[in-house]
């Protein structure tokens, strides 16, 4: 059996993973177009790893332009079983300071115009998404972050906005009233698509600023975000390296691994042949 890989999707400031050994760049074509960039595969801490820069090298893709379906599909075809997402976020709580790490366990969707499912064109599936992040993978990341000495918070709600503009003060204050912990632009639809692909997904959310709700802090700027995130890139790599040996390989017992088992509602005999072929890496064991 081919060894499963753990994927790392790098966010703003995280465009390469030079630590990978036995590096190989792979161009993957998908029915949903090309992924954000070529995917680098290799080995780290004894595990097979695939690295994909979410915004492409050089940061060429806006959050709304990220080809999330192509990204997740491509990683699935490379036998990825787990995705560690690294993301820059704004803090919505005083106690989450810039440079802190949050490993959220909930999502609130405020995106507007992003394709968020593989299942269309003659096939319908409703996956469970009450727990949008893989708890097992999140716990492994938390243990690793604690080991390397990062200021880390386990749990919390990530509100995902459309962007690319930052929040207005009114929006930021309302999100605060909702009790969310961090705000970002990229966890969705990634997390939804990963669940449909039966891939475990968790996020290392690095707080880079206090959004614009904080009266005593300057308004968020690109310079502030990038400066703080670059300080966290090395911490993120340390966390990932420490977490890899702790990530379950082989048989997974989390719900992510069988998310489609009872989710496909369409009668099998009416699913178009071209749809079956297009989604074979996702649904082949069920249809």
Image: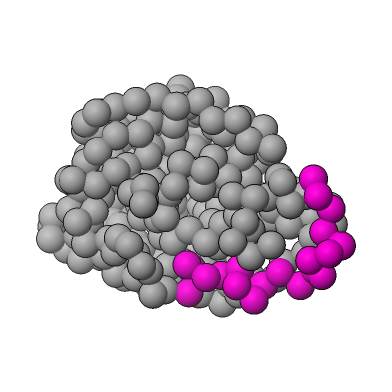
The answer to whether 232 appears left or right of 87 in the picture is left
For the C terminus, the quadrant is: bottom right
> Residue 101 falls in which quadrant of the image?
bottom left
Asked if one can make out residue 252 in the rendered structure from this viewpoint, the answer is yes
Residue 188: x percent and y percent?
58, 55
- Eyeballing the image, is 31 above or below 203? above
Residue 65 seen anywhere in this rendered image of the structure: no
Tell me the magenta residue range.
Answer: 255-274
Q: Position of residue 171 (x, y in %)?
A: 62, 59
Q: Residue at x 73, y 57 (%)?
A: 119
x and y percentages locating residue 262 in the rendered image? 64, 76
Q: Position of residue 140 (x, y in %)?
A: 26, 65
> Is residue 74 shown left or right of residue 241?
right
> What residue is drawn where x is 56% and y is 77%?
130
Judge by depth and name the residue closer to the eye, 279 or 13: 279
Residue at 82% of width from left, 70% of height from top? 267
Q: Is residue 281 above or below residue 33?
A: below
State the residue in front, 229 or 240: 240
Q: Is residue 37 left or right of residue 63?
A: left
In the picture, residue 201 is in which quadrant? bottom left
Q: Is residue 260 magenta?
A: yes
């Amino acid at each position: 059996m081919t060894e499963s890989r753990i994927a790392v999707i790098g966010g703003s400031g995280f465009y390469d993973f030079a630590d990978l050994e036995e590096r190989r760049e792979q161009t993957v074509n998908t029915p949903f177009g090309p992924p954000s960039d070529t995917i680098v595969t290799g080995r780290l801490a004894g595990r097979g790893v695939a690295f994909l820069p979410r915004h492409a090298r050089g940061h060429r893709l806006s959050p709304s332009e990220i080809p999330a379906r192509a990204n997740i599909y491509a990683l699935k075809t490379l036998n990825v079983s787990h995705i560690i997402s690294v993301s820059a976020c704004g803090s919505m709580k005083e106690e989450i300071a810039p440079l802190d790490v949050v490993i959220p366990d909930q999502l609130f969707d405020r995106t507007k115009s992003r394709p968020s499912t593989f299942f269309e064109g003659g096939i319908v599936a409703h996956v469970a998404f009450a727990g949008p992040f893989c708890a097992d993978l999140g716990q492994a990341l938390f243990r690793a972050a604690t080991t390397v000495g990062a200021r880390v918070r386990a749990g919390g709600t990530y509100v995902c906005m459309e962007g690319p503009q930052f929040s207005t003060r009114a929006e930021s204050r309302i999100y605060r009233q909702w009790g969310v912990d961090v705000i970002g632009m990229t966890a969705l639809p990634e997390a939804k698509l990963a669940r449909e692909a039966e891939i475990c997904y968790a996020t290392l959310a690095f707080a880079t600023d206090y959004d614009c709700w904080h009266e005593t802090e300057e308004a968020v700027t690109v310079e502030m975000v990038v400066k703080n995130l670059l300080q966290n890139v090395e911490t993120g790599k340390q966390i990932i390296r420490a977490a890899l040996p702790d990530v379950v390989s082989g048989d997974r017992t989390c719900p992510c691994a069988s998310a489609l088992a009872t989710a496909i509602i369409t009668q099998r005999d009416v699913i178009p042949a071209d749809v079956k072929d297009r989604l074979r890496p996702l649904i082949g064991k069920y249809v």
